[in-house]
């Protein structure tokens, strides 16, 4: 007989109850979801015609317990696209099972979301990074997952995705390229980087020895989120794009007097708020209308077509 594994915290049925409730409380049918990191919830201000629903009122939703995470969903439009924004995410160290942390992602899938944009605050491990740099995440290293704490552990529900999903294309290449293009247009090139994010369970920040190890194994920034959400989003076929704000430099040197702290993380978020709020919207914005003009002199024929190319 097969063991009974509890999957109710993010089961199809649980997610459907939440998704149906949300559909009954807003007319917005999001194709885009945004998950805001610590101190980065200001992005929700850029959403037009907002409809706000508090986590405490949403069936099956966990509650935000961390300063800098407001604890509400904001529905509306961003660059003309119907979207839902999580102003506050959940973390392993808050005591939730990893399946519960990622429940909103499955709920968004059931509501029709196709693309997920995630932000987070992270410590910079790459010695070339400065506080205030913004890292486009190219890839992640999921440390809790390696120790068996993967959000897809448990019985697999094929209605969401396959048992063994591929993760070599987790962070969408086209959206990453778009971010650099848009970053250049906006004059962000000096602080826009691309690199590997390593997820830890937290809540303690890393020791010096841990930072050295994480960097030597290929990570550029370290944090406590995002990877779990991306795994669940990719499992059910959504495109993912993620940004880390380098909110502090990881301490790699025993002579350093620096100490990581959450206040600095939130402060850096305030200082980079304007740029962090602009970038996601510009990445998903439909490209400007391109005018194609074909002149065929022999027949003196002019054919002009207007086309709008969508970036997502
Ligand atoms: O939600 P994110 O990943 O932005 O939050 C980071 C990790 C910890 O929750 C917190 C530490 O300051 O910021
Ligand atoms: N693990 C971890 N998470 C962070 N979030 C913001 N800064 C840090 C950091 O230095 N380490």
Image: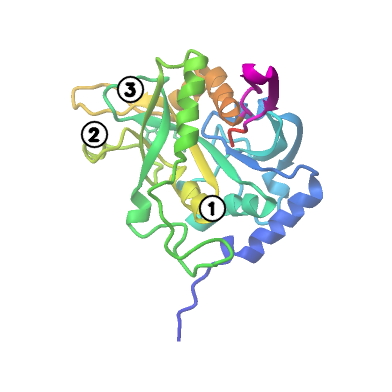
Q: Is residue 277 magenta?
A: no
Quadrant location of the N terminus? bottom left
In the image, taking residue 256 as reference, residue 120 lies left or right, namely right
Quarter occupied by residue 40 = top right
Q: Residues within 10 Å of mark 1 (few under 14, many from 20)?
A: some
Residue denoted by label 1: 237
> Which tag, 1 or 3, sits closer to the chain's start?
3
Report, in whole angstroms, how far the alpha carbon at label 2 lies from the one at label 3.
17 Å
> Which tag, 2 or 3, sits closer to the chain's start?
3
Residue denoted by label 3: 129
In the image, taking residue 226 as reference, residue 251 lies left or right, namely left
> Which tag, 1 or 2, sits closer to the chain's start?
2
Of tags 2 and 3, the one toward the viewer is: 3
User: Residue 104 versus residue 190: which sits nearer the camera?
Assistant: 190
Quarter occupied by residue 254 = top left
Q: Is residue 114 above or below residue 50?
A: below
Q: In the rendering, at what x and y percent does residue 129 appear? A: 33, 22
Q: Is residue 143 visible?
A: yes
Q: Is residue 286 magenta?
A: yes
Q: Quadrant of ligand 2?
A: top left
In the image, taking residue 311 as reference, residue 138 lies left or right, namely left
Residue at (68% x, 38% y) in the render: 83
Of tags 1 and 2, the one toward the viewer is: 1
Of tags 1 and 3, the one toward the viewer is: 1
Residue denoted by label 2: 208
List the single residue furthest toward the bottom. 1
Secondary structure at numbered mark 1: loop
User: Residue 77 versus residue 90: which sits nearer the camera?
Assistant: 77
Report, in whole angstroms, how far the alpha carbon at label 1 lies from the one at label 2.
37 Å
Residue at (41% x, 46% y) in the render: 169
Magenta region, residue range = 285-309
């Amino acid at each position: 007989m097969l063991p009974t594994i509890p999957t109710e915290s993010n089961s199809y049925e649980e997610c459907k109850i939440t998704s149906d409730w949300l559909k009954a409380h807003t007319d917005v049918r999001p194709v885009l979801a945004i998950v805001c990191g610590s101190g980065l919830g200001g992005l929700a201000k850029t959403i037009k015609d907002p409809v706000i629903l508090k986590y405490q009122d949403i069936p099956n939703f966990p509650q935000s317990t961390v300063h800098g995470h407001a604890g509400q969903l904001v529905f509306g439009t961003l660059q003309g696209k119907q979207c839902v924004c999580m102003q506050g995410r959940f973390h392993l160290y808050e005591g939730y099972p990893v399946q519960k942390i990622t429940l909103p992602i499955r709920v968004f899938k059931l509501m029709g979301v196709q693309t997920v944009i995630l932000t987070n605050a992270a410590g910079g491990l790459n010695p070339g990074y400065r506080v205030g740099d913004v890292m486009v995440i190219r890839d992640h290293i999921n440390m809790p997952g390696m120790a068996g704490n993967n959000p897809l552990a448990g019985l697999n529900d094929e209605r969401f995705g396959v048992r063994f999903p591929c993760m070599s294309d987790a962070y969408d290449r086209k959206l990453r390229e778009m971010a650099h293009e848009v970053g250049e247009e906006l004059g962000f090139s000096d602080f826009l980087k691309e690199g590997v994010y390593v997820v830890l369970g937290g809540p303690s920040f890393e020791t010096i020895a841990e930072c050295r190890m994480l960097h030597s194994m290929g990570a550029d920034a370290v944090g406590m989120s995002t990877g779990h959400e991306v795994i669940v989003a990719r499992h059910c076929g959504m495109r993912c794009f993620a940004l880390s704000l380098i909110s502090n430099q990881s301490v790699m040197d025993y002579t350093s007097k620096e100490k990581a702290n959450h206040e600095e993380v939130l402060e850096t978020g305030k200082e980079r708020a304007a740029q962090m709020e602009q970038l996601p919207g510009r990445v998903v914005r439909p490209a400007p209308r391109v005018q194609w003009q074909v002149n065929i002199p022999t027949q003196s024929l002019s054919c002009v077509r207007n086309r709008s190319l969508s970036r997502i």
